[in-house]
Image (spheres, coloured by chain):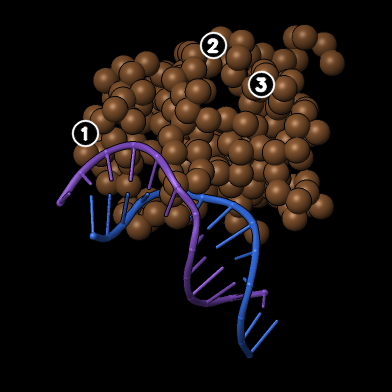
Chain colours: A brown, B purple, C blue
Amino acid sequence: MSPSKIKTLSQSFFDRPTLEIAPEILGKYIVFNSPFGKLSARIVEVEAYIDQDDPACHAARGKTKRNEVMFGEPGYSYIYFIYGMHYCLNFVTEQKGKAAALLLRAAEPCEGMEIIIKNSPQKIITKPSRLLSGPGKFCRAFGLTREQNRVDLSDSLLYLEDRLESKVRVERSNRIGIRLAKDKLWRFYDSESAAVSKP
DNA sequence: GTAGTGATTTTCT
DNA sequence: GAAAATCACTACA
């Protein structure tokens, strides 16, 4: 693969309207240089969370210590802990002062399969496409914790790559796992991927 | 195949 | 004290 076909996404990619970024981030690759080795995966499902007109967003009721990253500069990671067991990875979008992010819900494993399998429960290992099919599963398999919160995505630890051969069929639907604002069609996914969280 | 429940931190009422 | 941007196990049809 020639280097010209791989492009690292810079901060300017995230410094745009969230709903414009969402369909474009599908098919991109997330790369994490973990302490155990290099990991990467193809993003196939995201959800948008935007402060304004979104009661389901963590930031809708003001800034807290947990969600303050979302109010800051775009192009950062936002990892939060939920339900006592799971981490979820978000990408902060839009300009400083506006709280918005994209929640990474699912991806297809690419590099670092051995590490991903080691981090996953025995039962789901038989189905590779299910290894990263959910936000909590993705963070567990990649070994992401609060230590990776507020990471600069233009740095070399955690970043996104645009691989031009990656093709996506984008579909959108209502979001999953929330009670509020279910009517908003802010979930974007690749309908041709086996790894999306909805079967 | 679908349905129900437990685990357990952060934040808000 | 309760709910939340979840997952995986168990039970039952």
Image position of A104 (left or right of B13): right
The amino acid pointed to by label 3 is Ser
**Nearer-the-camera pick, A55 or A185:** A55
**How many residues crowd mark 1 within 10 Å: few (<14), some (14–19), many (20+)?**
few
Q: Secondary structure at mark 2?
A: loop
The amino acid pointed to by label 2 is Ser
3 vs 1, front mark: 3
Q: CA distance from mark 2 to mark 1?
A: 27 Å
Q: Chain of mark 3?
A: A
Give me the residue at 39% from left, 54% from top.
Answer: A178
Which residue is denoted by mark 1 in the rendering? A62
The image shows residue A22 at horizontal and vertical percentages of 50, 34
Q: Chain of mark 1?
A: A
Which residue is denoted by mark 2 in the rendering? A154
Q: Which mark is residue A34?
A: 3
The image shows residue A15 at horizontal and vertical percentages of 42, 18
Rendered image quadrant of residue A112: top right
The mark that comes first in sequence, 3 or 1, is: 3
Image position of A114 (left or right of A64): right
Please report contact status of discs 3 and 1: CB closer than 8 Å, yes or no: no
Give me the residue at 59% from left, 19% from top.
Answer: A158
Q: Secondary structure at mark 3?
A: strand
Give me the residue at 26% from left, 20% from top.
Answer: A97
Q: Which mark is residue A119?
A: none
The image shows residue A81 at horizontal and vertical percentages of 44, 38
The amino acid pointed to by label 1 is Gly
Which quadrant is the C terminus of chain A positioned in?
bottom right
Q: Chain of mark 2?
A: A
Which quadrant is the N terminus of chain A positioned in?
top right
2 vs 3, front mark: 3
Q: CA distance from mark 3 to mark 1?
A: 32 Å
